[in-house]
Image (spheres, rainbow, N blue to C red):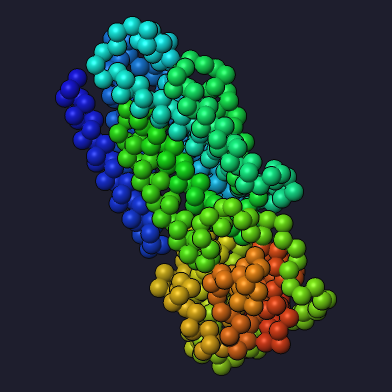
Amino acid sequence: MDSITHLADLGYLVAAALFILGIKGLGSPRTAVRGNQLGAAGMFLAVLITVVQMQAEAGDAGVQWGLVGLGLAAGGAVGLLMAKRVEMTGMPELVALLNGFGGAASSLVGLAELVRLAPEMAAADGGDPVPGYALWRAVFLVGVGASSLIGWTTLTGSVVAMLKLSGKWNDKLALPGGNAVKALLLAGAVVSAAMLLGDPASTTWLIALTATSCLLGVAFVAPIGGADMPVVISFLNSLSGVAASATGFVVGNNALIISGSLVGAAGLILTGIMCKAMNRPFKDVMFKAYGAAAGSGGTGEKRTARGYEADEAAMTFDGARLAIVVPGYGMAVSQAQHVVREIADELEANGTEVRYAIHPVAGRMPGHMNVLLAEANVPYDKLYELDDINSAFSECDVALVVGANDTVNPAAHTDPSGPLGGMPILDVEKARTTIIVKRSLSPGYAGVDNDLFYRSSTMMLFGDGKKKLTELLAALKEL
């Protein structure tokens, strides 16, 4: 048995190395596919080792392979169906939901172990436990409490985030009381978990822990505005990893401990990057609820933006030396990334340099625009991050904005106290001419009117993004 344990630990170490290499690969669009494959290989190896170890430990009793196979088949089928059916526009919602599933799975595994071992623990507490029992008991129950609290909070918080991203959550549904309610729910969950330490078989405290944790997830995410959803998704991803790591201590599985810790750390690092990109402290994003119930913003005066036709907009590219494409969520909604690339190809054929400006929080999840443009085979070296591209806008002849709003809104500079105040934006306003493809003048997730729409240097192309860009492409070919 010791040799099997040593081999399992060695296998888990290999799986951990694959996880680390996978996360490193995900740091760049160029290596993201390979990183995803390495991570998947690591998880497959970890699952395989776990199942083999279960069989060895079960001995003559064996493993109920039927249940194992049923679980793998059901999970694989659901995952495959979701991956095949989801559109790129729905990817942020899917990522949010998968974070919740990870948290729920960790909670259920931990609670299942508690239910299985509670009678034995009660008997041991009343007798003469073996050496080391007290330490094992404390680690076990703390792990169960942590995985339950964090896991259920992640599940309900992720569901709320998914509903917000899909536009199905009304911000007025936020629980009254704000941060005070969150504090009370957190205290209730911690107290319930602490009571389980003394009475592991208590159904009452188990239900209380689950209920308060679920409500905490709703209360935590509900007040946060949609503009901050990329940060929320990243943080929930981190929480799902922490829950998995806690469950690893409960079941004594090194792969869960290592992989959960990696996911938790990577999620926290990404959360920090997102907060820096928005120039907001993490505590302000999570507890000040920017933009959750924001109005239309702006000055309140009624202004009119002039709409143009595609052939008029095409004329501005004549003789342009530098054009910068700024993609936003509207590009994802209309699935216009392929037409955007064709426009860039046409411009480059006419001698215009084309770059793509990627804001860290463009879209509704980190890296959303990179994924869309990679799908359209846009070369990676043409994608520029905010800090690397902003200085070029003052030399830009034409900036083509496709469905972006908050990430190019000058209110970030002109209204420091507003929902976008202080957030680094793409300096599109400095371009000689700005073409904005958008369905309407509706504000972005932050709820702030965009002064850029009404400027004399701006040309608005109102309508479906893919349709208007296709018209623009046709007009460019006729020049």
Query: Which residue: 33% across, 55% down?
Result: 24
Residue 432 horizontal side relative to residue 276, left or right: right
List the single residue furthest toward the right: 302
Residue 197 at what x, y percent from top left? Answer: 44, 22
Q: How many marks?
A: 0
**Residue 116 lies in quadrant:** top left
List the single residue furthest toward the left: 3
Residue 109's place in the image compared with 471, above or below, is above
Residue 196's place in the image compared with 475, above or below, is above
- Residue 373 appears in view: no
Q: Quadrant of the C terminus?
A: bottom right
Query: Which residue: 26% across, 13% down?
Result: 130
- Residue 1 appears in view: yes
**Residue 68 lies in quadrant:** top left
Residue 27 at what x, y percent from top left? Answer: 38, 59
Pick the front one: 77 or 23: 23
Residue 23 at what x, y percent from top left? Answer: 35, 52
Q: Quadrant of the N terminus?
A: top left
Residue 348 at what x, y percent from top left? Answer: 49, 83
Query: Which residue: 77% across, 81% down?
Result: 306
Pick the front one: 32 or 424: 424
Query: Which residue: 63% across, 86% down?
Result: 433
